[in-house]
Image (tube, grey):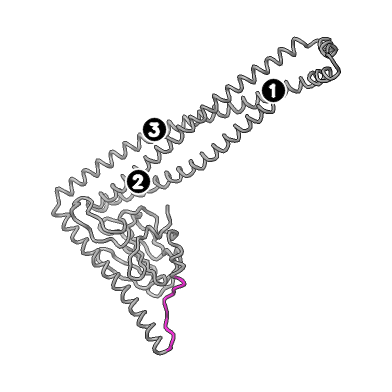
Amino acid sequence: MNFRLNIFLALFLLLAVSVRASAQDTSLQESKRAALEKEIAQLEQQIAENVSRSSSALNDLTLIRRQVEARKALLAESEREIGRISDSIGVTSANIASLQARIDTLTLYFERLVRSAYRNRDARVWYVYILSSRNFGQATRRYSYLKNLSETMNGEAAEVKRMRAGLELELSRLDSLKTEATQLRDERAAELARLRAEEERSDNLVSQLNRYRTRYQRQLATKRRQVEDLNREIERIIAEYMAAQKAKEKEAEKTGRPAAAVDYKLAAEFESNKGRLPWPADGPVLEKFGRHNHPVYTNIVMPFNNGISIGLAKGSAVKAVFDGEVRNVIAMPGYNMCVLVQHGNFFSFYCKLGQVSVKAGDKVSTGKVIGIVDTIDGQTQLHFQIWKEKSPQNPEIWLRPR
């Protein structure tokens, strides 16, 4: 009996570990699903606002293509969840079969004990059984057996009861898993339908852009000039500041008088937080860092993007990603108000603001609101950059994962 009980306990512990690991995996997948669903909802809101504010097909295309990507990622998460649930159903079914087999064996053994006890229920039978022993040792063993028979039967009955309770629990879990799998498959079918509709809308927008190629290429040329002007202006501001700083340091060496030095301690703190900086605003990344081809006129290479563009809801607040000092507040065509914040020899740059709540020389702390995003040509986006001296950085590498 102890051997069987040990096996049962081992199976129970193994099942508990499996359930705990499955729960952790489920929590991670639910977190990913929630993030993707949030991004899709944000994009849907921006698409709706864009339709009401602007007739720009390219703006719509950028948003819808990003929504398609998020929808595909959400479907992939659903597939993984369905696979996990299917595996759990298989494991649970095997556990149920194993438990049922053990219950059948224990029940049969218990029934034999009961029948044997019933047939020999007359006390005189037990006395004869003891007195017919060949020696005293055998008589003692028979007496102990008879004395413990009742306890043995009670123990077997309790074990059968425990295992049946475990079986009921597993059967209930199996029903829950099957219900969850059915619900996920229904959700996946609905997601697929929405994805096909979005892909069709994307194809229609591409056709529209190709039909009116000349008009959209004029818009593209304007945007290219604005991007190049912005890049040059930021490079100029940073280069001028770094040159002035070095000139001050050289002058200080000659005269022996101290000069305001770059705050390298702050720079070291900024660099130590690489990959953990808070996002300046909550929204999906619509344009990534680096050089890209035009999404429709694929033979056209776009100007190098020194930062990222984050899609936001109208009126969203924009916050500083780290402690620092406001170096400049400038206005740029196509980008409206822009704020440059210095963090030692690092710089963060926030563009496309409609309202600015800081000025040059202000000290800012992490999370301080520096302005409100603007809507420009139907788009509500924050353009965000990070520089290390004269070198632009990919902001997504510096910001915390989400």
Q: Residue at x 26, y 53 (%)?
A: 53
First of labels 2, 3 by sequence position: 2
First along the sequence among labels 3 and 1 = 1
Q: Residue at x 46, y 33 (%)?
A: 87
Helix, strand or loop under label 2: helix
Residue found at the very far bottom of the displayed protein: 255
Mark 2 or 3: in front is 2
Q: Residues within 10 Å of mark 2 (few under 14, many from 20)?
A: many
276 or 313: nearer the eye? Answer: 276
Which sits earlier in the primary sequence, circle 2 or circle 1?
A: 2
The image shows residue 176, relative to residue 322, as above or below, that is above
Residue 355, relative to residue 94: is it above or below?
A: below
**Residue at 31 percent of width and 36 percent of height:** 193
Q: Amino acid at mark 2?
A: Ala
In the rendered image, which residue does mark 1 sit on?
Answer: 156
| Label 1 crowd (10 A; few <14 / some 14-19 / many >=20) | many
Which residue lies under the disc numbered 3?
Answer: 186
* Helix, strand or loop for disc 3: helix
- Type of the residue with mark 3: Asp
Where residue 131 appears, x then y in whole percent? 85, 12
Image coords of residue 208 (percent x, y) = 18, 47
SS label for mark 1: helix
Q: CA distance from mark 2 to mark 3?
A: 19 Å
Point out the stretch of residues depicted in magenta. 256-266
